[in-house]
Amino acid sequence: MLTRLAAHEQVTIHAQFENQQMNFPLHLVEDEFHALHLELGAPSIFEEGPRIRPWRLVLEDPIPLETEKGALTALWVHELSFKGV
């Protein structure tokens, strides 16, 4: 039933752990025998608080931001998010 639904609509699994909400998209994939299976995609993770915001990893020690060529800039990264830095 889920496979048929995923063929026509976007299907996600929603989980909640403490103050975090996680949404896992389900993708319909075809294997080498042409059988269709559901596969979990990368989750979107949000923190609850005064307002819901994308999950962030607070770094113990900030790291310098580099250019595409690896040169250091004057900026420092303090937190990472799946939506950016």
Image: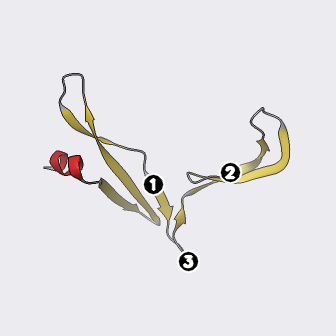
Q: Nearer the viewer, residue 33 or 72?
A: 33
- Give the secondary structure at mark 1: strand
Q: Which residue is mark 3?
A: 50
Q: In this rendering, would 7 be left or right of 14?
A: left
- Say which label, 2 or 1, has the lower sequence index: 1
- Give the secondary structure at mark 3: loop
- Give the secondary structure at mark 2: strand
Residue 6 lies, with reference to residue 69, above or below; the image says below
Name the residue: 19% across, 51% down.
5
Name the spot of residue 24 as percent of width and height, x first: 36, 51
Name the spot of residue 20 as percent of width and height, x first: 46, 62
Which disc, if any, is residue 55?
Answer: none
Q: Nearer the viewer, residue 15 or 7?
A: 7
- Between circles 2 and 1, the one closer to the viewer is 1
Q: Where on the picture, by quarter, is residue 42? A: top left
Residue extending farthest to the left is 1
Tag 1: amino acid: Ser
Bin the neighbour count of mark 2 within 10 Å (Cα to Cα): few under 14, some 14-19, many 20 and up. few
Tag 2: amino acid: Leu
The reply to whether dot 2 and dot 3 touch (C-beta < 8 Å) is no
The reply to whether dot 2 and dot 1 touch (C-beta < 8 Å) is no
Q: Which residue is mark 2?
A: 59
Name the spot of residue 9 as percent of width and height, x first: 25, 54
Name the residue: 78% across, 33% down.
70
Q: How is the image coloured?
A: secondary structure
- Say which label, 1 or 3, has the lower sequence index: 1
- Say which label, 2 or 3, has the lower sequence index: 3
Q: In this rendering, would 68 be left or right of 9?
A: right
C-alpha gap between disc 1 and disc 3: 19 Å
Residue extending farthest to the front is 8
The reply to whether dot 1 and dot 3 touch (C-beta < 8 Å) is no
Q: Which residue is mark 1?
A: 44
